[in-house]
Amino acid sequence: MTVRITLVRGDITAQDTDAIVNAANSSLMGGGGVDGAIHRRGGAAILEECKRIRAEQFPDGLPTGRAVATTAGRLNARWVIHTVGPVYAKSEDRSGLLASCHIESLSIADEIGAKTVAFPAISTGIYGYPLHEAAPVAIRSVLGARTLVEDVRFVLFDEAAFQAFETALAAEQGGDRPAKK
Ligand code: ADP
């Protein structure tokens, strides 16, 4: 069964999906953007679990492209899946790492039994990935993933992000097929 993708404009911390994905950094100790909002609204329980994961599994930090799950604390979701997006670089194609964030997050969702997952536009804030490059990678990797997750909701913070994802989704769903002669 293929994943159903929906796009919404909004704040990821308000989502009621089983899991929400955090655009974390490798320290897992919180940061700006989505990360800051999730820790602020979710409360200290999330950071506590992140600290334990660091100590027990990733003493050097969570590598880029990987994902781990914690409680969602006071948020509506049950779990937060933390993943580390690549920092954008003009000199190097890091789209494989960005794709990996999505695939690994869905794989963690399968492990914990989450059927509905909300993603932010990973790497497109502080990490500088242009929206028109990140959106097709995100959409394609979710559509191509082997997962038991049924619903993926991309939660886009502003109109520019929403439009980039809308364009990318339309292209993947057949909008860019050459017309038949
Ligand atoms: P990264 O470090 O991976 O670039 P950021 O958190 O800086 O992550 O930004 C990722 C994207 O999330 C950006 O497009 C940003 O506008 C958006 N964003 C920031 N806060 C929120 C939020 N509360 N809900 C949804 N998206 C958000």
Image (cartoon, rainbow, N blue to C red):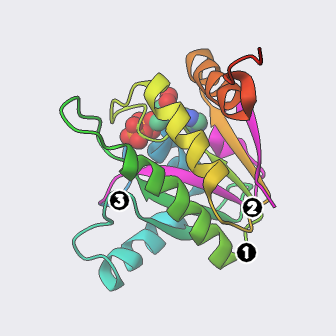
Q: Residue at x 68, y 66 (%)?
A: 147
| Circle nearer the viewer, 2 or 1 | 1
Secondary-structure class at tag 1:
loop
Residue 98 position, x and y percent, is: 42, 47
Residue 8 highlighted magenta (yes or no) = yes
Residue 171 position, x and y percent, is: 66, 27
Q: Which mark is residue 113?
A: 1
From which residue to which does the magenta span run? Answer: 1-26
Total numbered labels: 3
Q: Which mark is residue 18?
A: 2
**In the rendered structure, which amino acid carries the disc numbered 2?**
Asp
**In the rendered structure, which amino acid carries the disc numbered 1?**
Gly
Mark before the other along the chain sequence, 3 or 1: 3
Q: CA distance from mark 3 to mark 1?
A: 25 Å
Residue 149 vertical placement versus 133 (above, below): below
Residue 143 highlighted magenta (yes or no) = no
**In the rendered structure, which amino acid carries the disc numbered 3?**
Met
Q: Is residue 129 left or right of residue 15?
A: left
| Circle nearer the viewer, 3 or 1 | 1
Answer few, some or many: residues within 10 Å of disc 3's Cα (few below 14, many 20 plus, some between 14 and 19): some
**Residue at image mark 3:** 29
Q: Residue at x 75, y 61 (%)?
A: 18
Q: CA distance from mark 2 to mark 1?
A: 9 Å
Pointers 2 and 1 in contact (CB under 8 A)?
A: yes
Answer few, some or many: residues within 10 Å of disc 1's Cα (few below 14, many 20 plus, some between 14 and 19): few
